[in-house]
Image (cartoon, coloured by chain):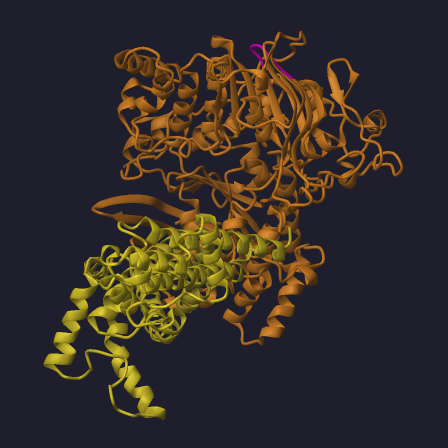
Amino acid sequence: MNARRLGLARLGQYAIVLVVAVTLNFALPRLMPGSPLALIAGVEAGEMTPEERAAVTADAGLDEPLVVQYLTYWKSILTLDFGYSFRQGTPIEELVLGRLPWTLLLTLTALAVSGTVGIALGAFSAWRRGSRWDVGSLSFMIALESTPQFWLGMLFIALFSVSLGWLPSFGATTAGADLSGLAWVADVAEHAALPVLTLSILSIPAVYMAMRYSTLSVLGEDYIRTAQAKGLRPRAVMMHHVVRTALLPVTTVLALRLGWAFGGTVVIETVFSYPGLGRLMYDAVSARDYPVMQGTFLVFTIAVLLANLLADSLYPRLDPRTRV
Amino acid sequence: MVTFASGVADLLAIRELTVTFRTGGRDVYAVRGVDLSVAEGETLAVVGESGSGKSVTMMAALGLLPDNAEVSGSIRLGDRELLAMEERALRSVRGAEIGVVFQDPMSSLNPVHTVSRQIAEAIRAHSDVSRAAAHARAVELLGEVGIPDAKGRADDYPHQFSGGMRQRVMIAMALACGPRVLVADEPTTALDVTVQAQIVDLVDRIRAERGMSVIWISHDLGVVAQIADRVTVMYAGRVIEQGSCADLFDAAVHPYTARLLRAMPRLDAVAGAELEVIPGSLPDPEAQPEGCVFAPRCDHTLDQCAAARPALLPLVAGGRHAVACHRAGDRLTHSQPPGLVGGAPAHERSAGQIVVALDDLRVHYWGRGSWRRAAAPVRAVDGVTLGLERGRTLGLVGESGSGKSTLARALLGLEKTSGGTVAFGGQVLHTMSAAGLRKLRCTAQLVFQDPSASMNPALRVEDVVSEPLRINRRGSVAEQRARAGELLEIVELPRELGRRFPHQLSGGQRQRVAIARALALDPQVLVCDEPVSALDVSVQAQIITLLSRLQAELGLSLLVISHDLAVIRTIAHRVAVMYLGQIVELGSRDDVFGGPRHPYTRGLLDAVPIPDPHRRSRPVPLAGDPPSPVAPPPGCRFHERCAFARPGLCDTTPPPLEQQRPGHWTACHLADEIAASSTAPDPVRSATG
């Protein structure tokens, strides 16, 4: 079996997951209590006249058989037509695409920061296993792991925005300021700083733990002794042999963390009033704006799938044993 | 303290070395005072069982001990004291002046880097050369150690090489900077006997070409006799005897050395010879005995043996044969105590009743193919017909990958067969109901190679032993516990051991526990897959003796799988030789070992090192590795490695397994011719008549 065929088989698996996610997304509002009319009209069905009800139902295709509705749903997804937000009346794809860059900014930056810091600290901790530093950082990470997101976010707002006044506490840009070029970049960075910091800090422990454990097991491997017996400097042993191999299982953790970060944006973006997908989802849930909820859910699913696909395709590059 | 009058200067000299590991308030005395040295161009073998401190001694010389190790004494390389060196200076010695080859080449090579990169890395660590130059040198080295198509394979990863080729890569890496001393720490233990012979020859050739010194650490006295100029025997962290290879094998003085030599199953012994068992075990590594470390296991002790530590002194003033024994001058006769016997009774020709019959058994593993075309199967077992006789032992030998273990698993119904049948007393396995199969399983039990990996570490020994009873709901808890106690006594362990956990036992004790567990359900058939491979020589003898005794007492039928032909020769009544999923030779122990008719059997036997330094000229070892069982060669599967193969016959027509002599089956077209041709002298045949 060649690599291309293996790649196709893997893509097939992802396609199956996607179909299941889309089907769940289709079923979700239909399983909710109350009439699906609420989904379209956004008001209690009881407040409508029977004629109005029939008109809306027919308009939305809800009188069709379920199979037809399902196929119609697929058609709308494939043509990127997700319907309209009843609250704002704007097309969903427009809403989502407008918000997506901000969420990507937060999550990808947070992933990069937490990945780098977590890997470095984890490797160092394992290298100095049992030292005061190792025990201290391990305890700290465990404490951090159990810290609620919103609490840390609010703590940062209280400290950096309210008390010290260093950083803005809400929005993605300064409202009304017409900035461009570097000034705009600086403004965006200032606004993203606290949400990114919160998301990163909370993502570090998982990466740290995975890297620390992975490094510890690699340090016990025979080939590390071989590397030392070759007379390599400790730093060369650490970089070329220990960290390089210890990173393998951590890539999977990082991919999973991306999915976690997407979920985390719901809370973080709400705390920091950040105009991303998480905030959009939160608002949609509060207002029972089902079409928007469905749209954001789908984007989150696809993002997580893409992250896993990336990790999967990266793995053979990192570990020659998994190449076919 | 010990000085040898000799003209050759010592290159690496270790004096009064002690290594103590301090762990959580407990001290483990790993090395208790070691003196050894190796001269320029010489091969020194350091022999000892596990726990003797032989590897720790070498790691101390390289400065590679963990931080909790406390080292004292002296290790000198030339005129430099290694123990006084700073880490930075020591690093320039490691790899550059002392090269190391470790035991398991798979785990000792980094799986994510190409082999050339790992060799080049060693070169660049010690000299300022470009990447390209280091790579070119790596390719040269790979060629030197006998990697075919070195240039093309240099950028392959370790997992793409066979075990023997991987060990060659390790050797190339150790040679990268032209070291003056090569330390080889059990370099062939993880390899097949045929590959071992190749590696031994390779190291010896390179040593001669480069004028390098070699320190060969081993527990295998056969290999040592073939390669060493001098031998140092270690026991419990001390050197107890050292001398020239011939002196040691011909006239061992220390009781331990003498008994070790007799405990070892050897191919040139009289067939069915008894193995000597060294009773007892190593002293507690946390104790620091005042006297001789071997005294508790020695038959010749005097009062002073327990009181004072014997010094390592030359037998003759100025001589090179030195012994650490108070009675070294007493010319002890190391006679074998009566009653401690092992080995299978010889010369039994009558065929017994067949307990398990395999008929054209096939086990193929199917890889994942594409949706259009199925992948070619791995033909692990490919048409085996065999019978296991009641109360007798069938030995199964072959290189790794020949399908021995798969065959055993299929026999026990643990492997889905792809064709043929396994029948227990006429009952065919795959036609049986699940309940019937469960019942049948009670009559056939399995003993694994690694006893610690096959036991739940959270269970006490008595629970490990009684687990089969629990699973099959035999008796009350109290009865099960009582039976566990009985079983422990059957395998010669004290009942009290039942309260301990597996990790608190020694390797030999754990293997006894594994045997006790296998006996719990009163089986008729015991399948032992490499039962002594993970054990030390003296313990091997104990387990072999135990298995023979149990067979005689309980009428067990044994299937013993081993890559160690000497072990099979000691324990088996009949022997089957397996190659690439098929039986190529089958016959009585004496027929197969005394008059092998298949060239593969011959190659295997020739590759076994004889523990006799006077018999070093051996036939050329069997070259190459076995071909892939996915696409076995057409015709005779062995023809590609066979020196006798005849084109047009052997490469086209598969030879059937025929009874060419009474009770002796061979699958070879040319067996008669080969038997008639007098090739290399065969030490085995001359010894067994």
Residue B8 visible from this viewpoint: no
Front residue of this view, candidates B423 and B325: B423
Residue A175 within the segment the image draws in magenta: no
The picture places residue B501, in percent across and down from the top left corner, at 30, 30
Left or right of residue B245, residue A202 in this image: left
Front residue of this view, candidates A212 and B106: A212
Residue at position x 29%, y 92% from top? A178
| Residue B145, image quadrant | bottom right
The picture places residue B366, in percent across and down from the top left corner, at 62, 38
* Chain drawn yellow in the picture: A
Left or right of residue A195, residue A321 in this image: right
Q: Residue furthest front?
A: A51
Left or right of residue B192, residue A132 in this image: left
The picture places residue B420, in percent across and down from the top left corner, at 67, 22
Residue at position x 77%, y 26% from top? B667
The vertical placement of B447 against B115, above or below, is above
Front residue of this view, candidates B495 and B344: B495
First to last magenta residue range: B387-392
| Residue B304, image quadrant | top left
Residue A279 visible from this viewpoint: yes
The picture places residue B474, in percent across and down from the top left corner, at 35, 12
Q: How many marks?
A: 0
Q: Residue furthest left?
A: A163
Residue at position x 39%, y 47% from top? B34
* Chain drawn orange in the picture: B
